[in-house]
Image: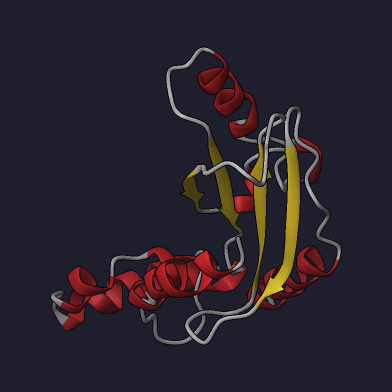
Amino acid sequence: MRISILIIFLLLGDIFAQIQKPVTGKIDLYKNFNSNFVTSRNIEVWLPDNYSSSKKYAVLYMHDGQMLFDSTTTWNKQSWAVDVAAAKLMSTGDVEDFIIVGIWNGGITRHSDYFPQKPFETLSQSEKDTVTNQLQQAGRAKGVFRPNSDNYLRFIVKRSKTFH
């Protein structure tokens, strides 16, 4: 029952997903961005106030993209305020100008997408079972836990770079 409620909550969260409103800059939303490597997910690209399409920018990729900019749209009403920090760093010249690619997590697949795959594969079966049981009890995995972080990395390297 607990897992069913969590799954419904995650699905409704994606259906009603709102574009975040940053304090500074602008966001382009790519809703349900498809990939052969991971489940579809939203991607938001933050552009600084002085963004120009004729200029080259460094790119910062960030996970849990739904948490980056706008506390009014997050599950816990808190954000990381990365737009504010980025704008300040760029305005003082501490860093070169950059854009931020915020990759939303996959909800129920979050832990399998982020969990280091190769180290997990070196664990004993007992240790793997312990990880699986802990994630299941926390409602973070259903069935046998299998990390998918190698495919998540492929998604970032091969697929998410294609849209900007």
Q: Quadrant of residue 68?
A: top right
- Which residue is at 50% across, 49% downward? 62
How many discs appear? Answer: 0
Q: Is residue 163 left or right of residue 10?
A: left
From the top left corner, tell me how far across and down residue 9 is, in percent.
Answer: 76, 67
Seen at 67% across and 39% down, the residue is: 52
Q: How is the image coloured?
A: secondary structure
Residue 78 location, x and y as percent?
Answer: 68, 35
Quadrant containing the N terminus in the rendered view: bottom right
Identify the residue shown where x is 32% and y is 70%: 131
Report x, y in % for residue 12: 81, 69
Q: Quadrant of residue 103?
A: bottom right
**Does 83 appear above or below 129?**
above
The single residue placed furthest to the front in the displayed view is 54
Residue 69 higher or lower than 114, as above or below: above
Near-viewer residue (53 or 29): 53
Q: Which image quarter: residue 145?
A: bottom left
Looking at the picture, how far across and down is residue 43, in whole percent?
65, 61
Residue that lies at the very extreme toward the top in this rendered image = 92
Residue at the image point whose x is 66% and y is 34% from the top: 48
Give the position of the C terminus as an image quadrant.
bottom right
Seen from the viewer's position, the closer of residues 7 and 116 is 116
